[in-house]
Amino acid sequence: MHNITQKKEAVNSQGATTSAPLSITWGGRVYLPTKDYPEFRTFNCIDTLHTGLFVEWKNSEIFTVLENLKQECVDDNFRPRPLKLKGFDDFIIYPSGKKGGYGWHISTSDIHIFLSRHDPRGSTPNVFVEIGSISCWTRGVHDVLAFIELLFMLQKGYVLKKIINRADLAVDFVGLDIHKTEIFNRDKWVKLARTYRIYGAGRRDNTAAFGFTSRSIISLRIYDKRLELQEDQAKLAIFKDIWGVPQDEEKPVTRVEFQLRKDALKEFKAQKYDDFINKIQGIWDYLCKEWFRLCNVKHRKQTQEAENTLWWDIVTETVWTKNTVYVERQSLKPSKAVEPLIDQAAGIAISVCAYLKMSADDIDGIVSMFNLMMRKKLVEMYSTTYEKFIDKFVVRQADCWDSLYNSTLPELS
């Protein structure tokens, strides 16, 4: 481990000293200049959070109001309209919802809420919340979720449980040019991700991305944050306030950002919101020590012995909470083999086709007939009893896979 010279300074986004790491913005550490790096300051925060809520409504008045306003949007050339409910003065409502049975979509700032009539005692959340980066960095996910729970209470809705579908953990290095980190030197990578991409403009690289595929449950981006924000000056101004950078001053900013999907959180046994917050430091340790490391030039057969670069040690030591809970990643394994189920389906196919007096020698006809009948039945179930179909699928999925949780949040993004 490198001996890092630093001047510790915990600040929030307004620049006031704080001892509560789970407030708005973590960190605010200042690292003094070395022969390799200039002076820079770090800030870290949950940058994006997608969470499913199980909400019990004591009456259905809110859905009546939402449906009426939604229809007004449709009648008005599908334009969003202001939403005025008790405590909802700053919201707008949209003419369409989200797949998965979430028929109503409302938002304020970069907080989007999708509501459905799913049974809150079932296995599928009936409210889905997406909290964007501005709200995460300026208000904090805890405050936003408390705000939403209060709004629901005013409408006679009570949150029974919160589970996470996606969480992004970000650290900004303010004053550090990304090329000083040597992240674009492939010989220094020790990684579990099988895929990577380097992005840039002209002959200058500005982003290194690892694990970004449709099947990835963990991914990492290390990129030039200031460059990304150049196209959104209003957002850049907000982040300059967070970073303590004068509006008329330009400083390089390097961001390290891990994205965790629902299955990764399940493997950490941290899909429940409280479990995630309790384990966030341990999860970060795993991500920076096991999933990816930036090392001094290594021998390919001795990657575990390779020493971190000074900068990656600083990344690893990012503080999210004072309590470090050790976490172990356990890959989800099926608790039921699929072969017996296939055998059972084949037996049913034989029985059905025998009942239809088909020839036992017409194997192609038997397969085609059974496929046709199964497709017709499944499409009918999906179309006519959608919510029941989804609930049954989720229950069967949870039954077939070992998991701490008895529910699986459908992929909604």
Image (cartoon, rainbow, N blue to C red):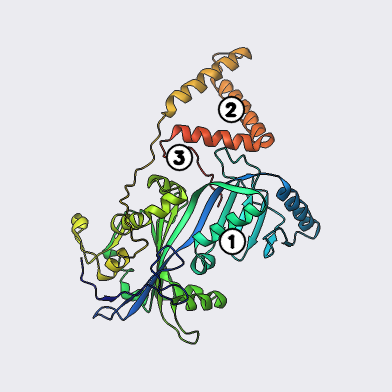
Q: Mark 3 belongs to which amino acid?
A: Tyr
According to the image, label 2 marks what residue? 371
Can you give x and y, in whole percent of width and height, for residue 241 in the image?
49, 78
Foreground tag (1 vs 2):
1
Q: Is residue 110 left or right of residue 197?
A: right
Look at 50% across and 59% down and name the residue there. Answer: 142
* Residue 202 to residue 395: above or below: below
Q: Quarter-wise, where is residue 117 in the image?
A: top right
Q: Height in image: 119 above or below 107?
A: above
Image coords of residue 333 (percent x, y):
38, 37
Helix or strand or loop: what does disc 2 sit on? helix
Residue drawn 45% across the image and 82% down it: 245
Q: In this view, does 35 lie to the left or right of 108?
A: left
Mark 3 Cα shell of 10 Å, populated few (<14), some (14-19), many (≥20): some
Q: Which of 60 and 202 is in front in this view?
A: 60
Q: In this view, does 22 lie above or below 370?
A: below
Work out whether residue 370 can be spotted. yes
* Disc on the earlier residue, 1 or 2: 1
Q: Position of residue 179 (x, y in %)?
A: 34, 75
| Residue topped by disc 1 | 111
Rate crowding at label 1 as few (under 14), some (14 to 19) or many (20 or more) other CA atoms within 10 Å.
many
Q: Which mark is residue 17?
A: none
Q: In which quarter of the image is residue 79?
A: bottom right
Q: Where is residue 348 in the image (x, y as percent from the top left)?
A: 54, 18
Residue type for callout 1: Ile
- The amino acid type, in three-letter code, at marker 2 is Asn
Question: Tag 1 or tag 3, which sits nearer the N-term?
Answer: 1
> Which residue carries the number 3 mark?
405
Q: Which of 4 and 344 is in front in this view?
A: 4
Compare marks 3 and 2 and give the one earlier in the sequence: 2
